[in-house]
Image (spheres, coloured by chain):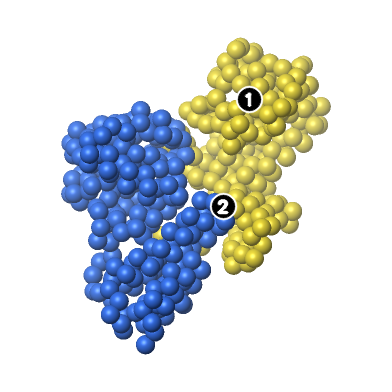
């Protein structure tokens, strides 16, 4: 198991800023909203010295793939879509388990009596920070995959597509999340709330990057065009 | 002394432009005139309603609507303070996030929209037990119960809460909302209404109240 403590650089912070503004609905058409941009910039500036970003990951060999299940030494993942993706992979196959957290510092300037507007800006900041940290943890395991000569799929999280949220348990069983201060509630809620858990497949050959390739639904989480041919 | 209509229009504009200074100036001037409370509240709500409709057509982003919502709140507080009483005087409504779910931002927004449209809101916060929902609906004599859940695992609590509320306080109008829900799920849970977002909230709640009052099925 590898513990990562990523340090956000200027590029990461620019990405964070752009993601927050985009999620809040401010694209180029709303360029005049400098008050919102100032607030986001100020919030990010006050954060930079204190972000408690942490992550953990682990590679586990995949033992077998069935129609709805990917088996490994200490358990299995139950998702038909992800099983299809793993089944398409060639050569040695590994599942990478990861958890990343933005910690709690992102909301240190928020108080219970704050306006709804501030609550929303900070909540969006926390969510996007968690995604940026998850991207940084992902970069680390991708580097390791590269060194081993392995390709990797995109990451896949419980609660999305056909993978039941209750399978958060599988990820938490495979990783000692206490080491980075993340806990899972009986309702499968992570604390700190701005945390990301995910898996991905690594193999000698990974022809399909995301289960969206097998799916015709036009859902809001779709990551590939609908007309992308399935390998 | 400023013209009454000019003050009311000024209030509406202050909400649209989330201009706190102008809001307080207009209210201060209005308190010196014979403008009645309902007219002031209506002007504030008209400003918010215009923002809400602009949000529906993607003309303003959500944070701009929330800034207007905060301005309405400030206005309502100021009016109540001037009149020497607690804010909120309309239909009693209990709202909360179901047990196990810590996500309360959506619920906070919805509670403020209800308050701004003159519901008397009792916000129980997050991770609220079934018993706490029932106790509060009974104690506050709530006409409406609004339940929020942001996860598929916590959403599973809703049918039991709805069943017990209907059993123990019949006639309560139960609205549900949250990311994993849709109209079909809300119906299957036995709710009386579902609001996808703050945009459709008020229409959906009024429709649910009418249905329940008339004894009509959803």
Q: Is residue A218 left or right of residue B96?
A: right
Q: Residues within 10 Å of mark 2 (few under 14, many from 20)?
A: few
- Colour used to depict chain A in the structure image: yellow
Label 2, label 1: how far apart the Cα atoms are: 27 Å
At 45% from the left and 50% from the top, the residue drawn is: B199
Count the numbered circles shown. 2
Q: Judge depth for marks 2 and 1 and give the one in front.
A: 2
Nearer to us in this view, B26 or A104: B26
At 68% from the left and 25% from the top, the residue drawn is: A213
- Colour used to depict chain B in the structure image: blue
Position in image of residue A83 (x %, y %): 63, 18
Q: Disc 2 designates what residue?
A: B58
Quarter occupied by the C terminus of chain A: top right
At 57% from the left and 15% from the top, the residue drawn is: A68
In the image, is residue A33 above or below residue A21? below
Pointer 1 indicates a residue of which chain? A
Nearer to us in this view, B3 or B131: B3
The numbered mark at residue A216 is 1
Nearer to us in this view, A227 or A145: A227
Q: Quadrant of residue A63?
A: top right
User: What SS does tag 2 mark?
Assistant: loop
Q: Is residue A210 visible?
A: no
């Amino acid at each position: 198991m590898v513990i990562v403590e990523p340090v956000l650089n200027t590029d990461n912070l620019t990405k964070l800023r752009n993601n927050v503004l985009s999620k809040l609905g401010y694209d180029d058409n709303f360029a005049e909203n400098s008050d919102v941009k100032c607030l986001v910039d100020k919030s990010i500036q006050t954060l930079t010295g204190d972000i408690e970003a942490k992550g953990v990951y682990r590679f586990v060999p995949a033992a077998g793939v069935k129609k709805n299940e990917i088996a490994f030494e200490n358990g299995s993942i139950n998702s038909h879509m992800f099983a299809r993706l793993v089944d398409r992979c060639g050569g040695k196959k590994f599942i990478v388990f990861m958890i990343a957290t933005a910690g709690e510092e992102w909301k240190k300037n928020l108080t219970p009596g704050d306006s709804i507007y501030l609550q929303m800006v900070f909540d969006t900041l926390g969510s996007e920070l968690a995604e940026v940290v998850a991207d940084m943890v992902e970069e680390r395991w991708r580097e390791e995959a590269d060194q081993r000569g392995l390709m990797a799929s995109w990451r896949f999280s419980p609660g999305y597509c056909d993978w039941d949220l209750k399978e958060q348990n599988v990820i938490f069983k495979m990783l000692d999340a206490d080491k980075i201060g993340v806990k899972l509630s009986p309702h499968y809620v992570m604390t700190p709330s701005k945390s990301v858990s995910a898996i991905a497949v690594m193999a000698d050959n990974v022809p399909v990057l995301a289960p969206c390739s097998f799916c015709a639904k036009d859902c809001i989480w779709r990551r590939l065009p609908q007309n992308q041919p399935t390998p | 002394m400023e013209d009454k209509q000019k003050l009311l229009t000024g209030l509406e504009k202050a909400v649209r432009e989330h201009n706190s200074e102008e809001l307080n100036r207009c209210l201060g001037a209005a308190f010196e005139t014979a403008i009645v409370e309902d007219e002031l509240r209506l002007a504030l709500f008209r400003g918010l309603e215009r923002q809400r409709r602009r949000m529906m057509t993607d003309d303003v982003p959500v944070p701009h609507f929330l800034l207007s919502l905060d301005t309405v709140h400030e206005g309502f507080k100021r009016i109540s303070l001037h009149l020497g009483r607690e804010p909120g005087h309309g239909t009693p409504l209990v709202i909360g996030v179901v047990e196990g779910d810590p996500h309360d931002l959506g619920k906070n927004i919805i509670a403020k929209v209800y308050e701004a449209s003159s519901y008397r809101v009792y916000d129980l916060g997050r991770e609220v037990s079934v018993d706490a929902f029932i106790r509060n609906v009974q104690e506050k004599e709530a006409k409406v119960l609004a339940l929020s859940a942001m996860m598929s695992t916590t959403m599973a609590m809703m049918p039991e809460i709805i069943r017990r509320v209907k059993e123990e306080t019949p006639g309560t109008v139960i609205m549900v909302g949250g990311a994993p829900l849709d109209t079909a799920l809300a119906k299957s849970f036995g709710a009386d209404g579902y609001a996808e977002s703050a945009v459709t909230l008020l229409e959906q709640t009024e429709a649910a109240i009418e249905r329940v009052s008339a004894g009509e099925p959803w």
